[in-house]
């Protein structure tokens, strides 16, 4: 094979004036492509949308009926991702909130974010095999986008989507493999959520583009999808149980959905039906399978098909704006 490859590279027939496509992808720094509402069709038809949704649904299937505490493979890449998240966590401890007049949006967040901006590529290079090092600048962009906005000091589902995109890219270059699926959610995404909750709490971050009481949650969406899949066919826990604090406290270590509810209960006061109306409605759905299907539909409608969220999404060679090949 190497012989024919050399031959094609050295032959200089006229049609070879086209730039040759290297064997490794031409990695690029991702950029925004959706600048007006009419561009949304381009997004929905894109390879990126198809790959992103495929990733979410593949993982949704992988975690079905499984506890966070079940047995699964933990690869070196997973361990490296966990130490990357551990570093972000440690930086929060090293960057305490500052005294300021306004209660929300503590400016120390910008200092914390500055460290990530400076170190992102170095951090990402620890989770990418040496032969794929060219992908680092492309993939690092998604990590930087996944922790909130440093101008507005806010965080929302678009930032969460950037972290899922980051993981999706690591799968596309082969750094993460099929056997890592459970660890991607139960180890890496779970750790990511803990770090995000700590950021949200420490720096009193604002919810980005929140629908307030009408949204599912101020900050997250994906853990409700994957978390409801974990509970499909559970012998005793039904959707109606998650509004019962006793059930949540008893089972949250095993189920991502209940971890999310527990965090809401810690952060909000007053009746659950008032502060989390959508979730309250969902607790009336008879089965987890129905909850899961409904949340996937809602995620597409409320997050992925909303211009204010998608206008910030960045496209490169791994998550491409090009239309899906027929």
Image (cartoon, helix red, strand yellow):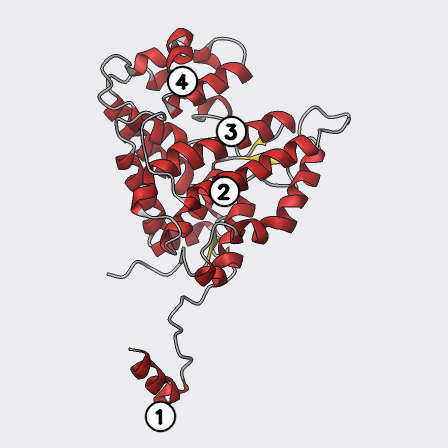
**Residue position marked by numbered label 1 in the rendering:** 13
**Residue position marked by numbered label 3 in the rendering:** 194
Labels in figure, total = 4
Q: CA distance from mark 4 to mark 3?
A: 13 Å
- Can you say whether 303 is above or below 129 in the image? above
Pointer 3 local density, CA inside 10 Å: few below 14, some 14–19, many at least 20: some
For the point 30% across and 16% down, which residue is it? 239
Nearest to N terminus: mark 2 or mark 1 = 1
Q: CA distance from mark 1 to mark 3?
A: 57 Å
**Residue 176 picture location, percent across and down:** 37, 48
Compared across the picture, whether 255 is left or right of 271 comes to: left
**Residue 112 picture location, percent across and down:** 67, 39
Quadrant in the rendering for residue 281: top left
Compared across the picture, whether 19 is left or right of 94 comes to: left
Judged from the image, the secondary structure of the residue bearing numbered disc 1 is: loop
Res. 46 in view = no
**Residue position marked by numbered label 2 in the rendering:** 308
Taking the view exactly as shown, the residue that stands out farthest to the bottom is 13
Compared across the picture, whether 98 is left or right of 287 comes to: right
- Can you say whether 301 is above or below 46 in the image? above
Q: Are marks 2 and 4 in contact (CB under 8 Å)?
A: no
**Residue 181 picture location, percent across and down:** 33, 40
Pointer 1 local density, CA inside 10 Å: few below 14, some 14–19, many at least 20: few
**Residue position marked by numbered label 4 in the rendering:** 252
């Amino acid at each position: 094979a190497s012989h024919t490859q050399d031959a094609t590279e050295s032959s200089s027939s006229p049609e070879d004036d086209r730039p040759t496509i290297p064997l490794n992808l031409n990695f690029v720094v991702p950029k925004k492509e959706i600048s007006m509402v009419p561009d949304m069709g381009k997004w929905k038809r894109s390879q990126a949308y198809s790959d992103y949704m495929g990733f979410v649904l593949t993982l949704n299937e992988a975690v079905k009926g499984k506890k966070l505490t079940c047995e699964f493979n933990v690869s070196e890449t997973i361990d490296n991702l966990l130490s990357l998240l551990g570093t972000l966590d440690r930086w929060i401890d090293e960057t305490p909130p500052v005294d300021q007049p306004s209660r929300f949006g503590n400016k120390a967040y910008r200092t914390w974010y500055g460290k990530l901006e400076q170190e992102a590529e170095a951090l990402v290079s620890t989770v990418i095999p040496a032969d794929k090092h060219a992908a680092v600048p492309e993939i690092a962009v998604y990590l930087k986008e996944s922790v909130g906005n440093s101008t507005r000091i806010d965080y929302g589902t678009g930032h969460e989507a950037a972290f899922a995109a980051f993981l999706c890219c690591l799968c596309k270059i082969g750094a993460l493999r099929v056997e890592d699926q459970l660890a991607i959610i139960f180890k890496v995404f779970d750790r990511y959520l803990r770090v995000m909750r700590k950021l949200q709490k420490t720096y009193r971050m604002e919810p980005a583009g929140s629908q307030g009481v009408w949204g599912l949650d101020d900050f997250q969406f994906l853990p409700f999808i994957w978390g409801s899949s974990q509970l499909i066919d559970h012998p005793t826990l039904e959707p109606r149980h998650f509004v019962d604090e006793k059930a949540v406290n008893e089972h949250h270590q095993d189920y991502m959905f209940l971890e999310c509810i527990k965090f809401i209960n810690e952060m909000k006061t007053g009746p659950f039906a008032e502060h989390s109306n959508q979730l309250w409605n969902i607790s009336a759905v008879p089965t987890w399978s129905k909850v899961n299907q409904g949340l996937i539909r809602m995620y597409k409608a409320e997050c992925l098909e909303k211009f204010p969220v998608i206008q910030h999404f960045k496209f490169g060679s791994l998550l491409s704006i090009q239309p899906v090949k027929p």
